[in-house]
Amino acid sequence: MSSIPEELSYTAEHEWVGAPDEQGVVRIGITDFAQDALGDVVYVQVPEAGSAVRAGEVIGEVESTKSVSDIYAPLAGEVASRNETLDAEPGLVNSDPYGEGWLLEVRLEDISSHDSLLSAAEYEQQVG
């Protein structure tokens, strides 16, 4: 069973979302389940800081030795930052999906939209 940290929220598309900070910024990545299904990640493409993202829209992709998978914006907002480290070390998505392998940070348009995400237990039911 892949790990599903309790303190994070999740989407049906296998993204995780951290709790909003004081500025309404959340950190986003792909779940352990997703990285395991993908295999060895060789390239990650996410939008630049300042880009607007809309919930449910494709905002990037993760390429592995097996396939290319779209990344969907879990919530609407503006990209605050992207994980530049992944440009040189995309494998961090595999080795540390909930830590150093995060993808981007988004300043939420509406902080309450975070409440619409899946809990760890709900996500576990989906992938279990």
Image: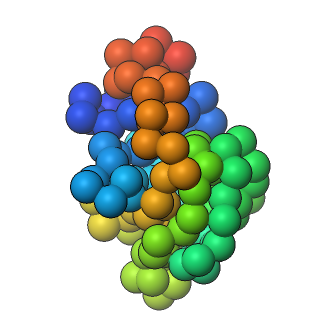
Q: Position of residue 31 (x, y in %)?
A: 45, 43
Q: Position of residue 114 (x, y in %)?
A: 45, 36
Q: Quadrant of the N terminus?
A: top left
| Horizontal relation, residue 94 to residue 6: left or right | right
Seen as rendered, the residue at the extreme bottom is 88
Q: Residue at x 37, y 53 (%)?
A: 24
Look at the image and name its color scheme: rainbow
| Up/down of 24 relative to 65, above or below | above
Q: Nearer the viewer, residue 2 or 20?
A: 20
Q: Residue at x 60, y 29 (%)?
A: 12
Q: Nearer the viewer, residue 39 or 96?
A: 96
| Up/down of 94 relative to 112, above or below | below
Q: Is residue 100 visible?
A: yes
Q: Position of residue 15 (x, y in %)?
A: 52, 43
Q: How many marks?
A: 0
| Up/down of 85 relative to 5, above or below | below
Q: Residue at x 24, y 34 (%)?
A: 7
Q: Is residue 64 visible?
A: no
Q: Residue at x 71, y 42 (%)?
A: 56
Q: Position of residue 109 (x, y in %)?
A: 54, 51
